[in-house]
Amino acid sequence: MGICVGRPASLSSATEQYLFKKTPSRSSKVANAPEPIRPSDFTAFPPANADGALLKNAAADLAAKSSTTVSSNSPSEQLPPTLLKRHSTSSGLRQRKPSTQKISSEAVNGLGAEAIGLSLKDAPLPSSTEAIHLAIARLRQMVQLIGDGSSLLDLPLEDVKANLEFSAKVLENVYEEEHRRVNEEDEDELSDVQPSQVPNEVREWLASTFTRKLSVVKRPNEKPKFRSVANAIRAGIFVERIYRRMSSSQVLHIPPKIVMQLRSIDEWTFDVFALNEASNGQALRYVANEVLTRYDLLTKYKISNYALENYMVAVEAGYSKYNNPYHNLIHAADVTQTMHWFLYQTGLAHWLSDLEIFASLIGAIIHDYEHTGTTNNFHVQSRSNLAMLYNDRSVLENFHLSASFALMQKEEHNILANLSKEEYKEFRSLVIDMVLATDMSIHFQQIKNMRTLLGMPENIDKSKALQLVLHSCDISHPAKPWDLHYKFTLGVLEEFFQQGDREQELGLPFSPLCDRQTTVIAQSQIGFIDFIVEPSMAITGDMLEKILKPLQGEDSEDAEPLELLNVVNEARPRTAPPVRSASEGVNAFVHKNNVWRHTAAKASHDIKKPWVQHFQENKVKWREEQVQSDAERRLKGRKDSDKEDSIDANIIHEEEVPDGSASRPLSPKHTK
């Protein structure tokens, strides 16, 4: 409301300053700046003998003015307190009262429009339909004011901010609701697979194993993403961390034959079977120690060699508990090494914090801990204790997580002992998200969700990205060279057949691909590659390219990786020796070229995709196996048919022999 006062002839400077001062605070900002105050603009006060009496009179005038101006306590009937009305002989100072005021278009731009309300008092919840309409109306009103030549600075900043935040919350709720609705759509992800393309048994296995509605796992809001300059700094810090000297107590003594195997751990073709043979069945502990050392995580999180060794011995024992042909420590070592490949060879590690790298590797190490050698469906159908414990939802995945973290609760196995509470909470949340995402029943939904995210301009959530990477690592053996893929295939099928044997004993129907007598191995693997693994790896590659592209900055403004490496090396103390790889055991810049060669590949917004070639080679091999298997089956069928014909002929011949002579050769007279 305006305050109109006169100015006395004998006003002291202190009183004049008090009555007519203008403060720079936002609560008293003038909406339309008045012209400089001139004596002629004011009427005179009655003479007063003292400034104190003058102040009392001014206060009384102000109270009287308020009582005559405001006729109701209702906000809708009050004059807007933010208006500044200019008259020929008076000017008003503006008062701000955020969240309860109304703004007049006339006051802002002189158009004579009705007053616009920005108050959020009694506003509906952001998740309601009414909130959507309210947010739309507020945004359009503010846009209209700006379009009419006004400035947002002319509006109450507190209310403008509150309305923008309210609108943002409404949009977030709309997006989440739409995303949830899409996830809950009940559609057949295999509807585009023609029956003629794949045998019924393989189709049934694909449908029963890789489909189920996705249970959405929420994570806290993502941290702010790195900018171009920050990426360069982050890369430099990463290189410095890689080249830091490791404590000798954290480098295990590794036999030379194992060192030879670990030298190829950065390659997609890494032979985990050869490492397991060289290490006498201890491949997982050596792979784990190597990759954790590679990223300097043992030093960063103060993990003692004693705790790490005890933990890995216990983890290997858990993987060996049921003597599984496939879900064993070799599979865990392979998944861990593949996760390292994605982090290391694509440059994904530059996008992640130390804790996220740590969680990614540990998630890969423990993702199948104490696997029972049977599927989730078997546990549900047999009503096992684990199915009862985890309510038929991601039974094995929940069990792997629970057992692994329970193991780390023991002091001698606690590799997380030196994490802060906040670090532990974030680490545990990320590992849980990643391992739960390895449930094969949510495969199609996970792929569909990521494909949707790739079509949006927003950045991809780190948790969702790492979930897909671990899932791809878990099913990646068909993307490896034939010798490795074939060995893994024999293991997984034998595990399926053992489950089928148990199902037969329990009187349960055979799960897909679990019947030794009817399963066609070649067809099952071709279907697995075509409909599961190949699309997963393609989506993972596209996701990584979208994630890593911004790390190069805009218009190639970032420094070349090799130049950045030289800068970092020059900044290091001359006396500081380079880092040692756990497998090398000697001082050497063992990863100098590898790190930055593959980081430089991101400059073309492309990453290496070695799986493409191996998919084609492996499918050709399986088709050859199928042709050979079909030929052997036909040959065996002919032999069986000839044998049956021979048996039938003998039976007919014996029926012509008199009783009691069937066992004797036929004499000439009996043949006449």
Image (spheres, helix red, strand yellow):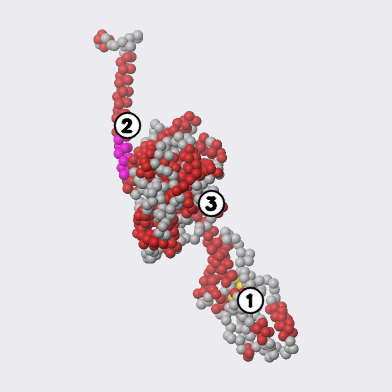
Mark whose residue sits in front, 1 or 3: 3
- Helix, strand or loop at disc 1? loop
Mark 1 crowdedness (10 Å alpha carbons): few <14, some 14-19, many ≥20: some
Pointer 2 and pointer 1: residues touching (CB < 8 Å)?
A: no
In this rendering, the count of numbered labels is 3
Q: Is residue 463 above or below residue 123?
A: above
Instruction: Please name the residue that numbered disc 3 is placed on.
Output: 419
- Helix, strand or loop at disc 2? helix
Residue 429 showing in the rendered view: no
Mark whose residue sits in front, 2 or 1: 1
- Mark 1 is on which residue type? Gln
- Residue 444 on image: x %, y %: 44, 48
- Mark 3 is on which residue type? Leu
Q: In which quadrant of the rendered image does the C terminus lie?
A: top left
- Mark 2 / mark 3, whichever is N-terminal: 3
- Mark 2 / mark 1, whichever is N-terminal: 1
Q: Is 283 covered by the magenta stretch?
A: no
Instruction: Please name the residue that numbered disc 2 is placed on.
Output: 633
Q: Label 2 to label 1, Cα distance in Å? A: 93 Å
